[in-house]
Amino acid sequence: MRLIRKRVVLHFPGFEPLDGVAHRARYERSARQSSAVWGYSLEIGAPDADSDLLSFEVTTSGAAGAGAAPATWQTKSRIYLVDHDIFVRRLRSGNTLSQIVAGFRSCAQIMLEGGMRQYFRHAWRFGLFFVFPFLLTALAIALTAQITVAPYGLGFSPWHMLWSGPVALSFFIFAFLPFSERFHTLHLFADWAMAVALGRMHRADFNDWLEERASAARQALDEEAEEYVISSHSMGSNVAAHVIGILLEREPEIFKGKRVVFATLGSAILQCALLSSAGLLRARVGLIARCPEISWLDVQCLTDSINFYKVPVVAVCGHADAPPAKMLLIRVKQMLTPKHYRKIRKDQLRVHRQYVLGPDLKAPFDFTLMTSGPMPASAFADPEQDRLPA
């Protein structure tokens, strides 16, 4: 197999309150873990913010073969980060009440568009992930109301609600809200608001931003390379599908003569695409699937409840006649030590982030090696394929 010497990566991170600089720092930490586990050399350049997208260069190298003078390999990868931190901060910028109202509005919109029914139909665990924060908050609101009217229900004068009301409000603010943050409830409310925006495509600020990101990505793709990897994690897969779809709409032959891997990690494309109004997103999924130069690798994990495990995303989006995404099924427990895995396994958002974090052990999937290693990213579709030259 021919090794990659020069690669360009467009990475679309998930819905997290991290800007490009913070995502680069995470990438560096994860890459150093990976290099220590696999035993290759690593150099990471300083961030370059001169272009519209923050980028940095990663150089990996090592020896291949045996004997007194083994052959050496070196791979240079230019990583471009297409984060959407601007919208994470915008959706989390209101006061607590406005965030709760916006969250329940998004919940109602998703239910009315058939999203919840489709979630339970295709991936019941994802359906539970959807209802959990709203059900938890609804129960807390109901309990707050119950505390407020408790004196009246016990036969006391309604005037007693002058003290039960503040007690109930204190319960909600000082007991429930801190407790709910263990489950990132308000963050999830904002996540669902963004899911509605990327599904409906009804907000001018989102649509204009996607067009701008597409133009910036177009410039990055002009750089000469042997391989182009378009990687995305979680909600970032929806942004990636829109951006690459826009490029294919503008220039159907934009990838002609290029080797392109479209890698979705713990993808949330169906989080948005299953809304009845998400016709444009589903159409762009079809454009990507039918592009002959693009190899689609869909990385999924059984213990990650925040993805559509074993669900054929292309077919479910209405393109059963298009080439399907190649599924790579991974196990988080194979990537971490038993102690580390026991520590994180009950935190579903932490498990969900493991796709882009560093490993403790050698495993069939390694994000750093896929985006910066010497083997073609398409080789990761085969779990038996070597991740480094023998």
Image (cartoon, rainbow, N blue to C red):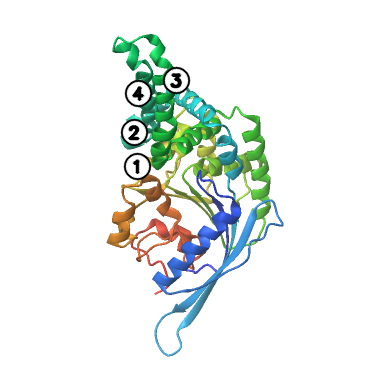
Query: In the image, 322: left or right of 246?
Result: left
- Distance CA(mark 4)–CA(mark 2): 22 Å
Amino acid type, residue under disc 2 in the picture: Leu
Q: Position of residue 133 (x, y in %)?
A: 39, 33
Q: Which secondary structure, mark 3? A: helix
**Of residues 209 and 72, which is closer to you in this image?**
209
The crowd level at tag 3 (other Cα within 10 Å; few <14, some 14-19, many 20+) is: few
| Residue at horizontal 59 percent and vertical 42 percent from the top | 243
Q: Nearer the viewer, mark 4 or mark 2?
A: 4
Residue with the mark numbered 4 = 143
Quarter-of-image position of residue 137:
top left
Whichever of labels 3 and 1 marks the residue nearer the N terminus, that label is 3
Q: Classify the position of the C terminus by image quarter.
A: bottom left
**Of residues 27 and 344, which is closer to you in this image?**
344
Residue with the mark numbered 1 = 305
Amino acid type, residue under disc 3 in the picture: Leu
Residue with the mark numbered 3 = 112
Q: Classify the position of the N terminus by image quarter.
A: bottom left
- Distance CA(mark 1)–CA(mark 4): 28 Å
